Image (cartoon, helix red, strand yellow):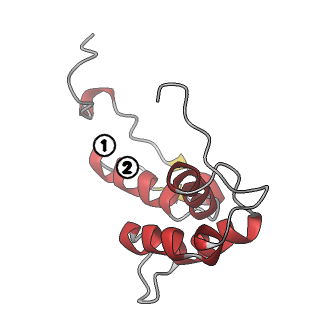
Amino acid sequence: RNWIAPMAPVAAFHATGAKRLLGGVTLPAGQTPEQDLDAALDNLFRHPNVAPFVGRQLIQRLVTANPSPAYVERVARVFADDGRGVRGNLAAVVRAILLDPEARAAPTDRSGKLEEPFL
């Protein structure tokens, strides 16, 4: 096994049957590995839990270790739609994180960023 090289789909090892994904989405049988991978990643990207998860992780890394649910929701809304109908625009998400009133307000008992042990 090669643990260093990037992963690559191998058609000989690919299951060609239909596949059921999150949210009841079913991929048709007979697709190539690349088509199945693209469809599966798109399905994950569009899942409603992705926006709050990514938003919370970015807030914790950039601003505060303990963001309020309202802060996470505001950032998740920008992830879901950047104002131009684009989902997942990270430039808009980071802008929303850093310019949010909670990020720019005076420190409170919820504010502050814990250092990661490695740092």
Q: Amino acid at mark 1?
A: Pro
Badge count: 2
Q: Does the residue at mark 2 contact the one at mark 1 (Cβ under 8 Å)?
A: yes
Q: Is residue 49 left or right of residue 58?
A: right
Q: Is residue 86 left or right of residue 50?
A: left
Residue appearing at x 74%, y 63% in the figure: 68
Mark 1 element type: helix
Q: Position of residue 40 (x, y in %)?
A: 45, 52
**Residue, disc 1:** 33
**Residue, disc 2:** 36
> As drawn, which residue projects farthest toward the front?
106
Residue appearing at x 65%, y 48% in the figure: 65
Closest to the observer, 25 or 16: 25
For residue 22, which quarter of the picture? bottom right
Q: Residues within 10 Å of mark 2 (few under 14, many from 20)?
A: many
Q: Is residue 26 left or right of residue 8?
A: right
Q: Position of residue 34 (x, y in %)?
A: 28, 48
> As drawn, which residue projects farthest toward the left?
5
